[in-house]
Amino acid sequence: MNSYPFADRAAEDERLVAQGALFDPLTVRLLTRAGLAPGMRVLDLGSGAGNVARLAAELVGPDGAVVGIEQDPAAVELARRRTGATNIEFRVGDAQTLEGVEGDFDAVIGRLFLMYLPDPVAALSRAATRVRPGGLICIHETDLDYVPAFPYTPLWSEAHGWFLEALEKAGIERRMGPSLFAAFRAAGLPAPRLLVETFAEGGPEAPAWGWANVIAAAVPLMERTGVAMYAEVDPPTLADRLLAETLACDGCVIGPPMTGAWVTVPEE
Ligand SMILES: C[S@@+](CC[C@H](N)C(=O)[O-])C[C@H]1O[C@@H](n2cnc3c(N)ncnc32)[C@H](O)[C@@H]1O
């Protein structure tokens, strides 16, 4: 399995739950548009703290079922604890090999996990083997190379720059969202439909905290890769400082463009 860069797992799962408030509405719209429907049996790859699996479980309803695959046992434990629904199961497993995961799912879905895999095309093509003919593959990934705040003030530029540089050095795909079209094709799948969406807000509710959280989570990676040190980033005050810069120029915070890509797997 790959080494996921956000090393403090308890903090990471807390971050994933919080981040869900921003991304979950976009994912529901994507899954609905892609055709996730009542009664389907769904596989969620890289399920983390369980947000996407829970959204899928609501869409497929009591006659459907969702299996979440996640490499980290602590995340799987947390996802199980957070879930009251009886139609979701979380398992420890590798989304790259899918060993022990038997097909025939009506849909394979996943959010923000392909970007961390060394070979996303191989993972997509393996995922396709677990979908029944006529079933759905629907993936939600992002593009981190965009302007996260307008104006792009000095602190935003510095903190965003540290984050991007650390991901680059760790070999993480910063532009997995817009790469999805080519990745689906390279995996032998039909050309996917695409949907790009994000969120944005100005004023005191602007979600600078979302960026501060992910930048703080990447500090150990930044230190390991020589990009920045804890004291420079100063995670405890980062959200307030980012927000203050944005408020000072009556600006806004813009979420990362989330690309959804989906296909129906051809009938044999
Ligand atoms: C950014 S989180 C996203 C979690 C969830 N999909 C969401 O959107 O809330 C990525 C998750 O993928 C998991 N992951 C990374 N590589 C994996 C692999 N090879 N197999 C299974 N899970 C993996 C990580 O442990 C992490 O929990």
Image: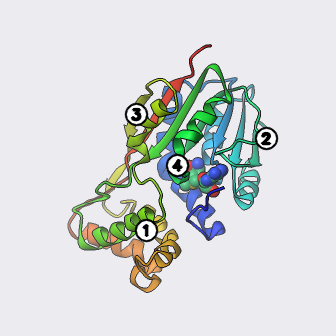
- Residue type at mark 4? Leu
Could you give the CA–CA distance between mark 2 and mark 1, rounded to whole angstroms?
33 Å
- Residue type at mark 3? Leu
Q: Nearer the viewer, residue 186 or 103?
A: 186
- Residues at circles 4 and 3 in contact by the CB criterion of under 8 Å: no
Q: Nearer the N terminus, badge 4 or badge 1? A: 4
48 vs 177, left or right, is: right
Crowd around label 1: few <14 · some 14–19 · many ≥20 (10 Å)? many
88 vs 255, left or right, is: right
Q: Nearer the N terminus, badge 4 or badge 3? A: 4
Identify the residue under disc 2: 100
Instruction: Confirm or reject: label 4 Cβ below 8 Å from ligand 1.
Output: yes
Residue 251, by quadrant, is: bottom left
Q: Split into 4 quadrants, where in the image is the N terminus?
A: bottom right
- Residues at circles 2 and 1 in contact by the CB criterion of under 8 Å: no
Location of residue 14 with respect to 224 vertically, above or below: above
Q: How is the image coloured?
A: rainbow
Q: Nearer the N terminus, badge 2 or badge 4? A: 2
Residue under the image location 52 percent in, 69 percent down: 217
Q: Nearer the N terminus, badge 3 or badge 1? A: 1
Identify the residue under disc 3: 195
Q: Is residue 230 visible?
A: yes
Q: Nearer the N terminus, badge 3 or badge 2? A: 2
Residue 166's disc is: 1
Identify the residue under disc 4: 112
- Dot 4 lies on which element? loop
Residue 267's disc is: none
Q: Nearer the viewer, mark 3 or mark 2?
A: 2
- Residue type at mark 2? Gly
